């Protein structure tokens, strides 16, 4: 039977799905013109009020903010346009009395960004070297590690010997190498429960006193950075934590090794690569190394804040400096693929491995969170990177689905708690508003009736539904058949979802491909372990007719409005009638 396999795919979809089951990714085209959106303006008014109340009372919808009296913040929300459309700064009473640096936070105030530096480093390396090196073994580029693998074989002593030959650059970038988190700095320098030099603090915790020979020869203070030779010798002598590719274990050390590798691959220093990236993106207040002078410096707690600490070879790990306005430029460039090809950007913004949490994964070095339930009938992913160093924290959060991101910089005490709390506050205000805008724009662009112009009676009607993803097919009638083949309108509903296949045919016109996905109406009984309830990704393109997928739909959009719709398997081009 001609449509038998398509009927089967619809049946499987209907059995498995109790609610809309879109393909992972955008359910509408990314919203545009956000700076002029009344919906977003209203959301930002709510956010402004929430933040103002938080800075005055320490209370937020996500819980109490205990650090509001001594934490200073700079926050930005941006899209792919050239301007930020939400900006917020707060100067704590402590900062207002600072004897060094600024006493008032502005968008150009300079913070340390901690491990957000890892994302900048990975971005710069991708730009300079491309993605082809991630699968290469690190021993190909670091001869010291090749020698170590021969001297201490993991095959003979897996507990004591790191399997360097099996560790790739990608494993290091995604925290899958199984190597120690740190050698000395920053862990021994920053951990309040350790005592530098193995002194009384460590002994009081029950640890034995250490002879001087057991202490790292470097990295035990802000002016005592290790050389790469010292650092490699120390990490080679350390025991592995896991075998490579076993599980994600956060490692600062991986990025020190990566910096050495990419410097040998490209013939450039990481500082040149990173500062070159800052220059191209016009990130004029950002730097690889410590800025000269303290004119724009945020120094929340005096000299003990660590603003002037020199991290040396650990700079690619967590030593960079930046501002609110520059963080927006960084995020915008990633969303726009201004420095990488769109394909490389998509490849980079993917999970490498999952964590124990069902909503968290790890990339290179993305910290990826799936947000369930916030947008009713579909989840979405946020690609983030956090940073914490000394008295500073940072957070960059990007959404490719909406082409929007937000970033924050925090200085003071317990900044890690503050940046996490603020992210929890912003997300449920921002993204429902973006979804509402995207749905309204999709309705304005595509909703209506499409009809054939020839002698064949062919009519399709589309709409959108509040709180639901995608374009809903109200009517699909061809040759007297009052439905999509195999689709029972009494029990199932058809949605159209955009792909990333777009062809600009002129300055004012483009074509975009959508895919049709069917979902069952009503509720299904509880599902088992191996039936997730959302398996439509199995079924896309499942049936072809004359070499064309039945679920492929191509729209022509001119001056922001759809003019034609082409269900390609039917070899028809339908004109929009209203």
Image (cartoon, rainbow, N blue to C red):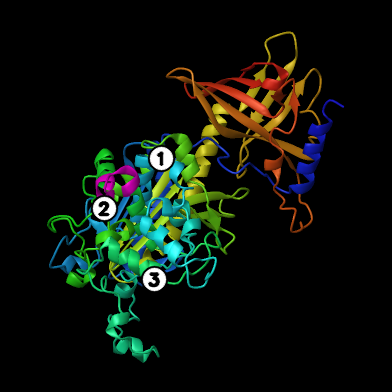
Q: Earlier in the sequence, mark 1 or mark 3?
A: 1
Q: Which mark is residue 322?
A: 2
Q: Is residue 550 visible?
A: yes
Q: Determine the residue located farthest toward the top in the rendered image.
A: 455
Tag 1 secondary structure: loop
- Label 1 close to label 3 by CB (< 8 Å): no
As drawn, 108 above or below 27: below
Task: Examine the image and state in which quarter residue 268 appears.
Answer: top left
x%, y% of residue 39? 45, 42
Q: How would you classify the magenta stretch by its main secondary structure?
A: helix
x%, y% of residue 324? 29, 51
As drawn, 249 above or below 321: below
Q: Which residue is mark 3?
A: 237
- Label 2 close to label 1 by CB (< 8 Å): no
x%, y% of residue 214? 32, 81
Q: Is residue 574 left or right of residue 142?
A: right
Q: Which residue is mark 1?
A: 130
Q: Nearer the viewer, mark 2 or mark 3?
A: 3
As drawn, 502 above or below 336: above
Q: Residue at x 27, y 83 (%)?
A: 212
Q: Earlier in the sequence, mark 2 or mark 1?
A: 1
């Amino acid at each position: 039977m001609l449509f038998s396999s398509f009927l089967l795919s619809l049946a499987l979809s209907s059995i498995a799905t109790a609610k809309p089951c879109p393909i992972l990714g955008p359910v509408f085209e990314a919203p545009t013109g956000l700076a002029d959106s009344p919906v977003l303006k209203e959301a930002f008014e709510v956010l402004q009020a929430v933040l103002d109340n938080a800075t005055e009372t320490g209370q937020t919808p996500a819980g109490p903010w205990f650090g509001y009296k001594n934490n200073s913040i700079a926050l930005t929300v941006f899209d792919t346009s050239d301007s930020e459309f939400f900006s917020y700064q707060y100067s704590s009473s402590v900062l207002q009395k600072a004897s060094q640096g600024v006493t008032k936070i502005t968008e150009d105030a300079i913070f340390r960004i901690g491990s957000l530096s890892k994302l900048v480093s990975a971005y710069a390396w991708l730009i300079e070297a491309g993605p082809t090196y991630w699968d290469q073994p690190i021993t190909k580029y670091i001869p010291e590690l090749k020698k170590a693998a021969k001297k201490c074989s993991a095959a003979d002593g897996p507990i004591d010997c790191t399997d360097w030959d099996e560790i790739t650059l990608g494993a290091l970038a995604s925290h899958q190498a199984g190597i120690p988190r740190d050698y000395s700095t920053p862990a021994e320098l920053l951990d309040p429960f350790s005592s530098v030099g193995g002194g009384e603090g460590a002994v009081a915790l029950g640890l034995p006193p250490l002879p001087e020979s057991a202490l790292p020869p470097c990295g035990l203070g802000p002016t005592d950075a290790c050389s790469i030779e010292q650092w490699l010798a120390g990490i080679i002598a350390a025991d592995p934590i896991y075998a490579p590719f076993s599980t994600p274990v956060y490692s600062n050390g991986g990025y020190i090794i990566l910096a050495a590798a990419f410097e040998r691959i490209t013939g450039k220093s990481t500082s040149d690569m990173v500062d070159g990236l800052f220059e191209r993106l016009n990130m004029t207040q950002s730097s690889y190394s410590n800025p000269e002078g303290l004119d724009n410096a945020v120094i929340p707690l005096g000299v003990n804040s660590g603003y002037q600490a020199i991290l040396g070879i650990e700079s690619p790990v967590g030593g960079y400096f930046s501002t609110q306005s520059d963080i927006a430029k960084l995020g915008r460039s990633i969303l726009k693929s201004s420095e990488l090809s769109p394909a490389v950007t998509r490849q980079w913004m993917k999970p490498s491995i999952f964590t124990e949490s069902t909503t968290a994964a790890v990339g290179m070095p993305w910290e990826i969170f799936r947000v369930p339930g916030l947008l009713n009938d579909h989840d979405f992913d946020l690609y983030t990177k956090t940073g914490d160093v000394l008295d500073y924290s940072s957070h960059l959060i990007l959404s490719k689905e909406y082409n929007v991101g937000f970033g924050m910089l925090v200085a003071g005490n317990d900044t890690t708690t503050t940046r996490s709390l603020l992210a929890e506050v912003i997300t449920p205000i921002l993204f429902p508003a973006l979804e509402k805008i995207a749905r309204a724009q999709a309705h304005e662009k595509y909703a209506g009736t499409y009809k054939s112009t020839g002698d064949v009676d062919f009519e399709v009607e589309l709409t959108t539904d509040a709180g639901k993803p995608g374009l809903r097919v109200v009517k699909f009638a061809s040759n007297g058949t009052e439905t999509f083949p195999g689709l029972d309108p009494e029990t199932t509903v058809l949605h159209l979802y955009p792909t990333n296949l777009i062809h600009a045919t002129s300055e004012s016109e483009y074509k975009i491909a959508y895919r049709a996905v069917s979902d069952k109406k009503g509720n299904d009984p509880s599902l088992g372990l191996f039936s997730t309830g959302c398996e439509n990704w199995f079924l896309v393109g499942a049936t072809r007719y004359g070499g064309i997928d039945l679920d492929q739909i191509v729209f022509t959009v001119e001056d922001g409005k759809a003019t034609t719709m082409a269900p390609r398997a039917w070899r028809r081009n339908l004109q929009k009638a209203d």
